[in-house]
Structure formats: C-alpha cells, structure tokens
Image (cartoon, rainbow, N blue to C red):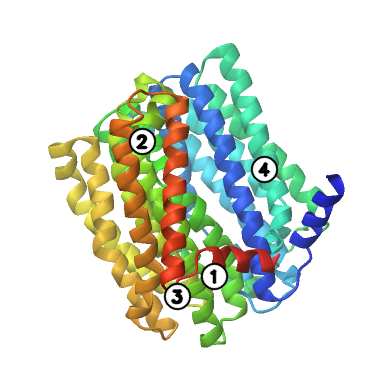
Amino acid sequence: MLERLQKIYQRLTAGGSTEEQAVQSGVWVTGINVGDRVLQLVKVVILARLLSPEAFGLLGIALLVVAALRQLSVLGFDAALVQHQNENVDEYLNTVWIMKMVRWLVIAAIAVASAPFIAQFFDEPQVAPLIMMIAIANLLLAIQNPAIVYFRKDLNFHKEFMYTMSGRVANLGTAVAIAVVYRSVWALVLGIVAMNLVKVSLSYLIHDYRPSVEFNMEYAKEMFDFGKWLLISGIFAFGLTQGDDAFVGWFFAAAALGYYQLGYRYSNAPATEVTQVINRVAFPALSKVQDSTQKLRRGVFRVLRLSMVVSLPMALGIVAVAPQFVIVAFGEEWRSMIPLMQVLAVWGAFRAVTKIPASVFKAVGRPEYDAYTLILKVAFIALTIYPAAERFGVVGVAYVIVAQGILVEPIRLYLMLNLIEARASELIQPILYPAAGSLVMFSVTIGADRYIFTSTGILELCGLIALGAMVYGVVMILIERTTTFEFIGLYRRIRQGI
C-alpha cells in the first residue's frame, strides 16, 4: 500500500509537458481546496455548536475590515511574476519582499488606529480588539518567503498543498481547543494566529531561497505596470465580494452577517472549490501558451468543459439539499441560513463559468478587461442593494448578487471569446449538456426529499447526496453515448495526464 502511494506521488510530481503539469497541478489544487473545505467545514460545524451566530458575525466584521485594507493596497506583484515569461525571477523577489512588508505594516497601523471608529460604525464595541489582533497577526505574513510564488509559476502545487494544509490544521486545532474551554469568539481569532505562524515557518522550510534587504525601483515599476490593473480589479472585486457583507453587517446586525457569510461560503462551493482550481492552475498554464491563440483556445474550452461537468450539478445540488444540510450540520439555530444558501448557490454557478475569463485576461496581459466589468458589477450593486434589503430583507441582498451576474457575466464571456478568437456557439455544448444533466438530478432530488426522505438527519442527507450523484452520472453517461460530449472521457484524459 505504501509503495503504491509513493508511485502515485511520483506521478503527481513528475513534471512533463505544460499540459501534463497543468493536469498534475489540478489534482493537487483540488486536494488543497477539498482538504481546505473539509477542515473548514469540520471547524464550523464544531464551533457552530459552541458559539453563536453573533460570534461568527463579529469575526466576519473584523475580517472584512482587514480584507478591505489588504485589497485596497494589493500590489499584484505575485501575479506579475507568474505571468512573467522568464522562468527564473529571483532578481525580483527582494523587491517584492520589501514592498509586502511595507504594505502589511501600513495595513496594521491603519487597522489598529481605525478599529474604535469601525466598531462604532457597526455598533458592535466587541469588534475593535478583534480587528486589532487580526491586523497584528497578519503582520506575520509580511515576513514569509517571497519565493512561494514559484509554487504557482512552476506549477509545483504539491508544495503549496503542504504549505496551505498545514496552516489549516493548525487553525482547526487551535480554534476548537480554545472554543471548548472558553466558548469565546477569540477562539476563531487565535486560530488565525496559529495558521499564520505555521505558514511563515513552512515558507522557509519548503523553499531554500532566502530574501535580503534589497530594493530595485526599475523592477518595482515593471511589475506595477502589470499589477496596477489587478489593484483596480481588486478594489472593485472587494466591492463585489465583500461589499454585500459590509452592508449586511451595517444594515442588519452581527447575527444576520453570521448567517449571510456562512450561507455564502457553502452555497458558493462550485465557485470556491472548482474555479479556485481553475484559476490557480489555468492562469500559469495559459500564461505559458499566451503566444499561441490555437493552444490558448483549446486550453480554455477544455477547462470550461471540466468546470461545467463538476460545478453545475454542485450548484443545483446545494439548492436541493440546503434544508437538510443546514439543520444537520449547524442545528435549528441556523435555519435562517437556508434561503440564503439556495439563492446564492445560483450565483455560485455563474461564478464557476465566469471565473475562466479572469484567468484568460491575466494570462494574455489584458487584466484591464477584468477591471472594467467589475466596475459595472459594483455600480449595479451600489444602486440596488439598499432598496432590495428594505423590501426583502437579507435575502434581498442575495437577489442583487445573482442579478448582477446575470447582467454582466455575458460581457466577460464575449471579451474572452474575442481574445481567443472563438465563436459564441462553441459555448453551447460545454454548458448545455451538463445543465441538462443537472436539471434532471435536481428534479429527482427535490422529489425524493419531499416524498421519500421525509425526516431530517445525517442518513437522509447522505441518501439525497448519493441519489443525486447517481442520477447525474447516469444521465451524463447517456448523453456521452448519444452525442459527441465527453463525460467519462474527461476523466480518462485527466488520468492519462498523471
């Protein structure tokens, strides 16, 4: 058994062509995302029984503030180095390291100084010390090894797996241990501290590069020319992904924010699990073939097919099993999260499709396209979120998030198709067939929940998930046998790549 595992590991780290490396990296990034989500789910399920929704909301406000400062000062240097055509970028790393240290010092100083005023704005006095501690804890990330960028640039995601998962395990163990003893929101904060300590330590253990105090203005300017559009995109992406959180925390209360944030996190699994794999692997892989439109186009459609086969059934499956999942995983106290999960799962499906253009825009050196469309999204949300919240409550905020996707995402797809010189009709097959299989699965699962699995429990939840997976698999196999669409064939291609 051990020998077989060693062989599998060797195959997953063997390298090869860019396509083979991309497939291997996809497996590792999938492992990172699945492992990360499992650890987070275990942590949240345990802590949801020990802490209140208000505690999660308080942490959400604190993280929101630090995330805002971080996003407003994003440098885009890591993305610039990944996109850089030179394989060796060591000469840039010292400049990156110094800039990141300065950035995190400024973020921490602003966060600590503004914490009392932010707590007053949200009318939550307990938030101020949480903001200060998280900002100080994030200073640890300022001194981590800048060479971790090679994990993505060289598609060495097995190293990032070790780096990321070790931090998450430390977070889980620390948070749960403190929550069991003290039943306090500080359990969540100290878990973050432990995670950052472990990640900084591992960044130097895994990579032998050692930074030094050396700054080169020319390198900084070169990277900023690329990163400035990521800065602009990041600001508006924050408004898109976190602005609704800030509004909910201000308009309603910390408890409502706790429901909303957890509902968003688990409803958007198709985007956070599937498209994170796509973005983290597709961006460096597509960057390597940016000079060949034919290879770029082929890679994009392969990624799109795989994404749709996995993400669309996940999205509709979440809508179907949300009532069972919330009660079983979190308890009756969290029932208000059910409609939020169901609405936001639709947005998760959109994100699974349209995160692909973002990778293409960066890979071909046109990140401004991402910035322009994000501006449209944020403008729409800013105009509609207040009246929607007044009319429909917290669920109204979720309606707005879905609506902006329906309106703006087709524009992003159009821009992507122009860059790769493809026709809109080529999108039909990768999306239509998985959508059809997902709708059949959704209908059967909803019917089974209503007429067969009539009670609520872990066995019923597992039964619904198993039934949905089986129905979807059968339908997609039938589609594969009667059309040219690949389903099992996609799995075979992936397996051949490793």
Q: What residue type is disc 4 on?
A: Met
> Going by the image, does 281 lie left or right of 461?
right
Q: Residue at x 50, y 29 (%)?
A: 44
Mark 3–mark 4 Cα distance, whole angstroms, equals 39 Å
In the image, residue 245 sits, relative to residue 308, either above or below, namely above
- Asked if 458 appears above or below 295 in the picture, the reply is above
Residue 109: image tag: none
Q: Which residue is mark 3?
A: 484
Q: Please indicate whether residue 135 sits to the left or right of residue 450 in the image.
A: right
| Identity of the residue drawn at 37% across and 37% down | 321
The earlier-in-sequence mark between 2 and 3 is: 2
State the residue position of label 4. 165
Question: Looking at the image, is mark 2 or mark 3 nearer the viewer?
Answer: 3
Measured in 3D between alpha carbons, the distance from the residue under mark 1 to the one under mark 2, in whole angstroms, is: 43 Å
- In which quadrant of the rendered image does the C terminus lie? bottom right
> Which of the two discs, 3 and 4, labels the residue nearer the N terminus?
4
Mark 2 and mark 4 lie on one chain; the one further toward the N terminus is 4
Compute the Cα span from label 2 to label 4.
27 Å
> Is residue 184 at all visible to an observer of this figure?
yes
Q: Amino acid at mark 2?
A: Ala
Name which residue type carries label 3. Answer: Thr
Helix, strand or loop under label 3 = loop
